[in-house]
Amino acid sequence: MPLAFESNSHGTIAFGFFQIESHMLLLDRLFFFADDFCDAVGALAGGRSPVELDGWRIDSREGIGDLHGAIAGRVHTGFIGQTYLRWPFPARPEDFHQNPDCHATRDEVAAMIAPFGRPRRIRLRGSAGSDPIRIDDYVFATQQFADLLAYVDRGGYPRWRAERRPDYVVRMTTGLLSLAPDWVVEV
């Protein structure tokens, strides 16, 4: 589930996984895949700036959908609603964990977002040891950015299934320990 995070530019915003069978992340109205994000963060920490990744922007709330209604199985509007039609919320609470193998659904999720979002190159700018870090128009202080990365590292809320992180998350976290230790938060 996306959680509320602070940014310097937009105040409190939603960030995170919104469907346990997809590794897509949302950042307010931007959507992008977690493996691309982790690779971009690694490149940024390694000294490349700017770094770009493919994503989408959905401007309307109707286009985004109603997360809580979709989870409850009542409202399946917008992009998020379509993902919950395909992969309903688990009936058993103990099954509510982010699937570390959900990158296999990437093509299907990309097809689902196409009618709702505009494709967009999302630019990350910044460097290890300095403020601010930017994701498109969103500006984060180092600690705010580290909080986003910690969320991805732990698999958000509800955490990775069996606490098993995907390889792309392990690669990002391992690289950050040596390249950008101020971006690492214990999870």
Image (cartoon, grey):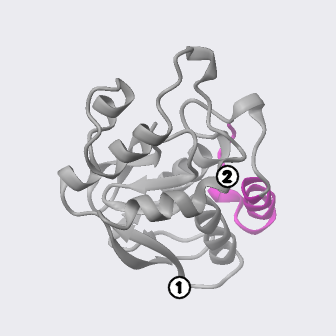
Taking the image as shown, residue 82 lies to the left or right of residue 164, namely: left
Q: How crowded is mark 2: few (under 14 residues within 10 Å), some or many (20 or more)?
A: many
Left or right, 168 with reference to 136 = right
Callouts 1 and 2 close, C-beta under 8 Å: no
Q: Distance between the residues labelled 1 and 2?
A: 20 Å
Front position in the image: 8 or 77: 77
Part of the protein shown in magenta:
168-187
- The vertical placement of 127 against 13, above or below, is below
Q: What element carries label 1?
A: loop
Secondary structure beneath dot 2 equals loop
| 145 in relation to 16, above or below | below
Q: Observer-nearest residue: 13 or 47?
A: 13
Q: Which of marks 1 and 2 is nearer the N terminus?
A: 1
Q: Residue under circle 1?
A: 50
Q: In this rendering, is residue 68 above or below 21?
A: above
Task: State the residue in front, 7 or 21.
Answer: 21
1 or 2: mark nearer the eye? 1
What x and y, as percent, mark residue 98?
62, 37
Instruction: Indicate the quadrant where residue 9 lies.
Output: bottom left
Instruction: Say which mark, if any, is on residue 184.
Output: 2
In this view of the protein, can residue 2 be seen by the observer? no
* Residue at figure coordinates x 75%, y 69% from the top left: 179
Residue 137: horizontal and vertical position, in percent?
32, 72
Identify the residue shown where x is 62% and y is 40%: 155
Residue 28 forms part of the magenta stretch: no
Q: Is residue 178 shown above or below 14?
A: below
Residue 43, percent across and down? 67, 77
Q: Does the magenta stretch include residue 173?
A: yes
* Mark 1 residue crowding within 10 angstroms, few (<14) / some (14–19) / many (20+): some
Q: What residue type is labelled 2?
A: Val
Quarter the C terminus occupies: top right
Name the side, left or right, on which 182 lies relative to 122.
Answer: right
